[in-house]
Image (tube, rainbow, N blue to C red):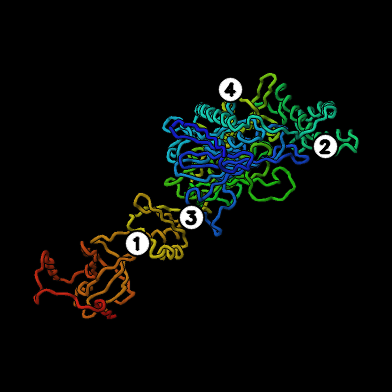
Amino acid sequence: MNVVKKTITLGDGRIVEIETGRLAKQAAGSVVLKVGDTMLLATVTCAKDAKEDVDFMPLSVEYKEKFAAAGRFPGGFMKREGKASDSEILVARLIDRALRPLFPDNFHAEVFVNVNLISADKETMPDAFAGLAASAALAVSDIPFNGPISEVRVARIDGQFVINPTFKALESADLDIMVAATYENIMMVEGEMKEVTEKDMLDAIKFAHEEIKKHCVAQKELMEEVGKVNKREYCHEEDDEDLRNALVSFCYDRCYAIAKSQLGKHEREDAFSALKDEFIETIPEEERDDKMVMINRYYGQVEKECMRRMIVDEGVRLDGRNTRQIRPIWCETNYLPGAHGSAIFTRGETQALATVTLGTKLDMKELDEVLVHETQQFVLHYNFPPFSTGEAKPQRGIGRREIGHGNLAWRALKPMVPVGEENPYAVRVVSDILESNGSSSMATVCAGTMALMDSGLKIKKPVAGIAMGLISDKKTGKFIVLSDILGDEDHLGDMDFKVTGTKDGITATQMDIKVDGLPYEVLEQALAQAKEGREHIMGEMMKTISEPREDFKPNVPRLVQITIPGEFIGAVIGTGGKVIQEMQKSTNTTITITEVDGQGVIDIFGENKECMDAALARIKAITTVPEVGETYHGKVVSILEFGAFVEILPGKEGLLHISELDYKKVEKVEDVVNVGDELDVKLLEIDSKSGKMRLSRRALMPAPEGWVERERKPRPSGDRGPRKDGDRGHRREGGPRRKPENHE
């Protein structure tokens, strides 16, 4: 067994250990990455050759957290890991987006990257090391890869940048982004911020890159030690220069003209397709099938070149806009009368319909993952049906793209959505994309903001988002930054850079680079141009709705929140939840109780004021502390020979002695009151030791003329001395003491 190890020292002194040669040796490449007690196993495998007619990079990335890693059982009936959770998919996407651009363009063999969390501690965040583990596995394999890369989390805590902070440290951060890069270039950025400046974000990226360089050096050393510097040879593309030249000669000028025609999305696609079909007709029929893969590849290159040259040389885009221009925007709120909040945001050929639903704490999303156990008060879901792009195909389940785009929009809005004591409601935003031609996730941010304001929820500030693109020319070094990119500009361009924020700063970002080499001056210009575009979009949104509604809509269930002393929580819930369940049923409300700092926070959720008032009255009655001298309306619950017990508050009974029933002498309690009678009584006394309450009906009646109240003798205190017959002695063995008979 030939085990090779490399170590990397983080800024806080923690050691990252990368080991190969011990586990999963039949994989093309495998490493175990260890930080403290956290361990990641990363493996890569690759097909021997490309499948026939495959002209793309078939890369699959999976990230899985094993529950055993943290000493836990998975949930569910099967008690085993099931399909990937949203968080696992998001980590897999982070790895994929960093790796994919660095495989050779002409390499088409299937590649599978698997990263498993096999051991975990409560402090280390494994997602920050998953990209490094995956890259190291590729480094020790023979798979062609223009890396290595690494991926780190950079956070700003107390004004200082920190690399790969712990869970606890991250709680106080105002900037949290993941950055992936090679030694030379930034490849991917994603994260959330609390209204930071463009300069702050750029400084964070630079800080992360310096750390990543160390990781890349360590991987190159590892590659050399295992002898994997030279990768496998392959030939996955056939070329026919005569065919390429013929296609360029036939198509280029006409393709350029179509690109400049400013046709709509589908009309442009049809025109490009028709032109390709015309060229195919020039090929002998018996040769077409054999050459079709090459024709598709060469024609795609021509399309890309025409669009890029048009932008670089003439500054004209596919839809006729200049590089900074934003497409026309129109918005509408309160479009859906049955929803708690709704908005339509349309920008060019991209349209999002967002809805807001407000619920109780019982509606909050519960996260039960290997290292995360919490509830989310605010959730956002993104849907991308096929009809949004005019595709005629069935709508399947939610894919990775939907999860990724929804997460970005959620991060963008999250800092502005009030939670906790500021807002007792659970909040769900749903964005349905009805049309798509560029940056539907940013349309989701804008539509979501307006829907939240339409609901009456008092968000802190509105948020807008924009997608930036890039066209670069390697020959001249010239680059053009594009604002509000189209779908084709994303597909054929060199960058997809999404930025969201308020008027005061950035809240979220996602950047994917598709080329080797991106100077920081490009990022700086892109951020400045994005701010300009965001402000324009925000201005258009504000024309429709500029602040939240003063009040919730009539169809929004009302919610009131009260706080009770902690000792009353059990009384409100009751044995086995009996009291609170009966209360919810009888008042038609939903009631939740949360203990916070020794007190009970109660949320009462009802369809109307009457229901809520009834529940509130019940709770206040249970939690009210009786006060001496106050008058209570009670109910007789039992009668004894010497008086009656009256319930003055739920669960609180006092003795109404026979002498306190009336000024005149009462021979029998039943002559005045019976079980079930309701009456007003005055609380005369609460025993300081036993808590027993003494009530009076007589005290609320007018005294007879000439009546003189007999003075009550104070109860004796101290040692009462021995009994007349001496000490009681031991109680005889046998059953319990006999209870007083009930003479009802």
Q: Which mark is residue 622?
A: 1
- On the image, the x and y values in percent for residue 379 come to 53, 47
Q: Is residue 543 above or below residue 210?
A: below
How crowded pointer 4 is (Cα within 10 Å; few <14, some 14-19, many 20+) is rated as few
Which of labels 4 and 2 is toward the front?
2
Label 3 – label 4 distance at C-alpha: 49 Å
Q: Nearer the viewer, residue 557 or 62?
A: 62
Three-letter code for the amino acid on which mark 1 is drawn: Ile
- Sequence-earlier tag: 2 or 1: 2
Label 2 – label 1 distance at C-alpha: 79 Å
Three-letter code for the amino acid on which mark 4 is drawn: Glu
- On the image, the x and y values in percent for residue 74 come to 52, 54
Q: Which mark is residue 217?
A: none
How crowded pointer 2 is (Cα within 10 Å; few <14, some 14-19, many 20+) is rated as few
Identify residue for label 3: 362
Which of labels 2 and 1 is toward the front?
2
Which of labels 4 and 1 is toward the front?
4
- On the image, the x and y values in percent for residue 295 come to 81, 34
Image marks 4 and 1: residues in contact by CB distance under 8 Å: no
Left of 215 or right of it: where is 329?
A: right
Three-letter code for the amino acid on which mark 3 is drawn: Leu
Left of 677 or right of it: where is 443?
A: right
Helix, strand or loop at label 1? It is helix
Q: Nearer the viewer, residue 262 or 213?
A: 213
Identify residue for label 2: 292
Identify residue for label 4: 521
**Occupied quadrant, residue 257:** top right
Label 4 – label 1 distance at C-alpha: 66 Å
- Sequence-earlier tag: 1 or 3: 3
Which of labels 1 and 3 is toward the front?
3
